[in-house]
Amino acid sequence: MANQITTIVKTRKRDIARMEKITIRKHLNSDALITTMKNGFDKIQDHRPGNVQHSLGDTIMAGFAMFSLKDPSLLAFDERRMTAPHNLMTIYGMGSIPCDTSMREILDDVDPNDLRPLFKDAFRQLQRGKMLEQMVFMQDSYLLNLDGTGYFSSNKLYSDACMEKIHKNGKRTYYLQAVGAAIVHPNFKEVIPLCPEVIRKQDGQTKMDCERNAIKRFLEKFRQDHPHLKVIINEDALSSNAPHIDDLEQYACHYILGVKEGDHKFLFQHVDRAAETGEAIELVVADKDKKESLHYFRIVYDAPLNKSNQERRVTFVEYWEENTKTGKIQRFSWVTDLDVTEDNVYLFMRGARARWKIENETFNTLKNQGYHFGHNYGLGKKHLSEVFIFLTMLAFLVDQILQLCCPLFNAAWKEWKSKRSLWEKVRSKFHEFSIQTMEELYRSLLEHKQVPLSR
C-alpha cells in the first residue's frame, strides 16, 4: 500500500513538473483565437430589425462552438446548451445561446461572405507570431493547394442551391460542393486552410466547369484578402489549360499543375523530341532515407502547353520513382512557371507531390477525424449550408493553428492518443466540470485534475 501511495505521489509530482514547463503563446492559443473569432462575429451587421433575443454575434459564435467541440448534430449541441450553458458562455464569450431552431433561422439569412474576414484575422495572428514563415516553400512563396470536394449528397433532400445529377434510370441526386484551399508544406503535417469558395448551381454541370468558375471567384477574393502574399498554386491535371493559367497570371500566382499524356499529346511529343536531341535535362537522384528508392527526372524548358496554345510556354518536369527491390515505378509530370534546376528539382518534386495534402490532411481529416464534414446540419432556404461550411473550416483553421503553434494543445493530443479521443474528452469536460478557459481545460486533461461543476 505504501509503495502504491509513493508511486501516485511521484506520478503527481511528475505531472505538475511537466505542466509547469508548458507555456503558451499570447495570440496563438485556444482562448486568444476564440476571442479573435468572437470579435470578428460581433462586427457583422445584424440583418434583423428591432430588438432581438440573441445577438447575431452570439448566434454565429454558437455555430462556431458547435463545430469547435465537434458535436455531431445541432441536437447534440442543443443538449449541451441546456446541460452546460455556463461553460459555453464563459469560454466562447456568449451572452445567450439560441436553441437549434433559432440558430438555423438566424444563420440562414447571414451572407457567407461576411465570414471571410475571420479567416484573414486568424491568418494575421500566424503572420504576427512569425509562425507562417517556416512554411515558405520555393522562391519565397507558399504552396497553396486547391481542389474541389463534396459536402452534401442526397436523393431526397435538396434546396435551391443544390446541383442535380440525373442518372440513366431517371433518378436525381442533389449535391453541394466547394473549392477548398490550404497552405501546405511537404515537411509539415499541418495545413492552413483559407476561406473556401462554394460551387454554385449556375457554375455548370461538369466537374471542370464547376470548379473552374468557382476557382475564378476564389482567386479574385484571395487577392483582395492577401494582395501581397506570394503563392504557388498546386492543382491536378484538370487545371493545366491556357485559360486557367491566364487567370493565375492575372492574380500574380505561380503554379504547379499536373499534366497527363492523354490530354497533352502535343506537349509530350515535344518533350520526347527534346530528349532525343539532348535538349532535355535528365538526372538520377538516390534517396538518402530510402536506399531502395531511385528518383529519375526530366526537365524541358520553354515547352508549348498544347497544340492550340503553342505560344503558351511552360517548364515541363517529368518524374519517376523506382523501388529497386520490388521494381514498382510511380510516374508523375507537371508544368510550371517556377525556375526549376538540377539543384532544386528534388525539392520541387516533393512540393508537387504534396498536392495530396488538400485531400488527405484537409478533406479526409474533416470527414474522418471528428469534424463530421459532409453531415447535413441543415440546408436552409438561403445560405445556411454555406454558413455551416464556413464555420466548420474556421474551427478546423483554429485547430490547425494550435497544432502548429501550441505546445499545450499538442501535449493534450499526445496524452489522449488520437484527435477523436481528445475531442470526446473535451466534450465530456463541458458536461461534467466547471471550466473558465480552454487553457484550463487542456491543462486538466494533462493533470487529470477535475473541478466539480456548479449546478
Image: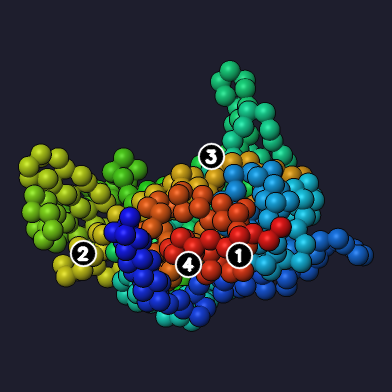
Disc on the earlier residue, 1 or 3: 3
Q: CA distance from mark 1 to mark 2?
A: 51 Å
Q: Which residue type carries mark 4? A: Arg
User: Label 4: which residue?
Assistant: 443
Q: Nearer the viewer, residue 184 or 348?
A: 184
Q: Furthest-front residue in view?
A: 2
Q: CA distance from mark 3 to mark 4?
A: 49 Å
The numbered mark, 3 or 2, whose residue comes first in the sequence reads: 3
Is label 3 in contact with label 4 (beta carbons under 8 Å)? no
Gap in angstroms between the C-alphas marked 4 and 2: 44 Å
Amino acid type for the residue under numbered disc 1:
Ile
Which residue does the numbered mark 3 point to in the structure image?
Answer: 206
Residue 345 marker: 2
- The residue mark sitting in front, 4 or 2, is 4
Tag in front: 3 or 2: 2
Q: Percent from the top left, x then y, of residue 95?
A: 76, 66
Question: Are circles 1 and 2 on residues that touch, CB within 8 Å?
Answer: no
Q: Secondary structure at mark 2?
A: helix
Q: Residue at x 53, y 56 (%)?
A: 426
Mark 4 neighbour class, 10 Å CA radius: few under 14, some 14 to 19, many 20 or more: some
Query: With 119 as the anchor, is 232 left or right in this view?
Result: left
